[in-house]
Image (cartoon, rainbow, N blue to C red):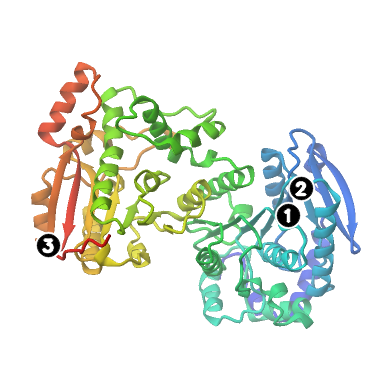
Amino acid sequence: MSKRVSRRKLKMDKEKLKKLVLKRRKKYYHKLPSFIEKKFEITELKDAGCKSYRLVPKTGFDGEFIIYLYGSSMCHNITTEQWKLITDIALETGKGLYVPMYPLAPEASCRELFDMLCKSYANFSKSFDVEKIILLGDSSGAGLALSLTHLAWEDGLRKPDQLILLSPAMDTEFFDKELEAQINENVFYEEKYFFSEGAKDFINTYWVKDYAVKTIYTSPYYEEDLTDICDDMVIFSSTNDMFNAYARNFYFRAKSQGINVRFFEFEEENHNFMIHSKSQNALVAYKYLVDVVAGTYKASVPDLVPLKRISDWTKTYPEVMKDDWTLKFIFENKKSLAGTRLPKVKSEYKNLITMARYAACDQLVKRYINQFPNCTVINVGCRLDNMFNRVDNGRIRWYSIDTHNTMAVRRRMYGVNAREITVGRSEVDLSWINEIKCKRNQGVLFVCNDAFNYMSPGVLRMMFDTLLEKFPGCEMIFTTTTKGVATVQNMRPGKGIFRKRKRKLSIDDAYKFFSNWNLEYRVMDEIPLKKFLEPVKEKKLRTKFRLAYNGLTLNQKIIRTKLGSEKYEINI
């Protein structure tokens, strides 16, 4: 229970809540804030006796519309904060807005609400020349948006081109008691929302009414078949959100059905934090949301920098690194990088040694795939790298492991591939290991380009022990540095959005390092990165000396280890 939700509210029955709702409704009567009139052309429409607002930016309109269903808990008017969020997005992306003022409980029920929404959606999608429809809802409005998407598909109406759910509340009948228990666990963190038996009775009595068990209207979370209702779904949630368990489960179900769905998740934020919070997470989430609506990648610029460098290497050093897909992607998305001062690589040596890390991983992975053509490869801390397409033989099974937010961007970039499974977990959250499904006798390889260097040796050892137990005989390929290099790099942390994390791992002697951990960890190769730059002939004298030093000291290297002694059969 939060500081802002009194015990009195939690103990209110449905009749007392009804009086409270009606009193609040009079106090916060919905009207357009004055700032909207200054920046939008406003058209007021009537659908089934209810108002709808059509707002078009006075400057920079691109012909696409966002239909916004605001979160109301089924009984409250739209707030100024909600208007602020949605109009900011519209102005920044050049989209028009269509906002239905749908009927609310206790005066209206689910039946009246969807009579109005369905007519409003049908009229809007048919009457206006709309290039693209983005259906966006927050909280209970997100649940309404999901229901409306199902109903549009059933009625043969134009389906939304994109469905965006912010902190979705997709259940008003609470058939799943385990999920309801998780609401009660997370409601402790909430500041503006609460969940109680009185609230459930209020919704059931005044909103659900005779639509009980008609889950497509009341609880779209329980609708099993999600195929073909929308070609692009995006979900935003947070770990402390009272409905986070619903959002996660819905994402995993949609993903398992092959739906093009993306899931953004933020740590320690409450329900509807994108509207109410001014935190750094809320700012980052807003930037991601703008990218989702506009089809850009501006929020992902730090993750795009390696792709920009791979693109440059493809043009300058095609004998070492060739990635035509990345070259094309960077060219087509130049506006996402426009206006951003990218960190310059002044040193030829640093530029080449960074390229060598990528080339080394590619070459050793290809070598393993040649030996085990039907193997499973797991890329840990993959970011947005295109390694899968660079090494793919058309048969391997590939797992990409990184945070939910990175995976959401990645799924938009690369689309859905049946042989590439994206797992939204931080590399230090070892629960991702349980997601790996493979046939061990066909080969299992783990690869990590640089991400291990930011993990503590203790966490890395725990990971290796778990992998040895679950995948005996697997191999691990990763890049690292000696202690001296790690110390120097920690002294140069970078600035702003390009600020680097502190390096925690360094390995001077791989054989000694792993033998101290476990004798079943066998080092197969410890190779200086210099070896992968041999095709590059023209180098500055200073670069040649530094590469020679790298060859002598192995201060930057790639390591290949085998966990356990089990041997795999080569099945071609």
Q: Which mark is residue 431?
A: none
Q: Work out whether residue 32 can be spotted.
A: yes
Q: Position of residue 485 (x, y in %)?
A: 20, 35
- Disc 2 crowd rating (10 Å Cα; few below 14, some 14-19, many 20+) is many
Q: Which residue is mark 3?
A: 520
Measured in 3D between alpha carbons, the distance from the residue under mark 1 to the one under mark 3, in whole angstroms, is 57 Å
For the N terminus, the image quarter is bottom right
- Label 3: state its secondary structure: loop
Residue 415 spot, x, y in % from top left: 51, 51
Is there CB contact under 8 Å for labels 1 and 3? no
| Sequence-wise first label, 3 or 2 | 2
Residue found at x 76% / y 71%: 20
Secondary structure type for disc 2: strand
On the image, the x and y values in percent for residue 499 come to 39, 37
In the rendered view, tell whether residue 567 sits above or below residue 205: above
Gap in angstroms between the C-alphas marked 2 and 1: 7 Å
Mark earlier in primary sequence (2, 1)? 1
Query: Which amino acid type is marked by label 2?
Result: Leu
Label 1, residues with CA under 10 Å away: few <14, some 14-19, many ≥20: many
In the foreground, 300 or 484: 300
User: What residue is at 39 percent from the left and 26 percent from the top?
Assistant: 315
Q: Which residue is mark 1?
A: 68
User: Which mark lies nearer to you, 1 or 3?
Assistant: 3
Q: Give amino acid for label 3.
A: Glu
Nearest the camera: 33 or 265? Answer: 265
Q: In the rendered image, which residue does mark 2 sit on?
A: 97
Q: Residue at x 83, y 51 (%)?
A: 53
Can see residue 491?
A: no
At 46% from the left and 52% from the top, the residue drawn is 407
- Disc 3 vs disc 2: which is toward the camera? 3
The answer to whether residue 443 is above or below residue 318 is below
Alpha carbons under labels 3 and 2: distance apart: 61 Å
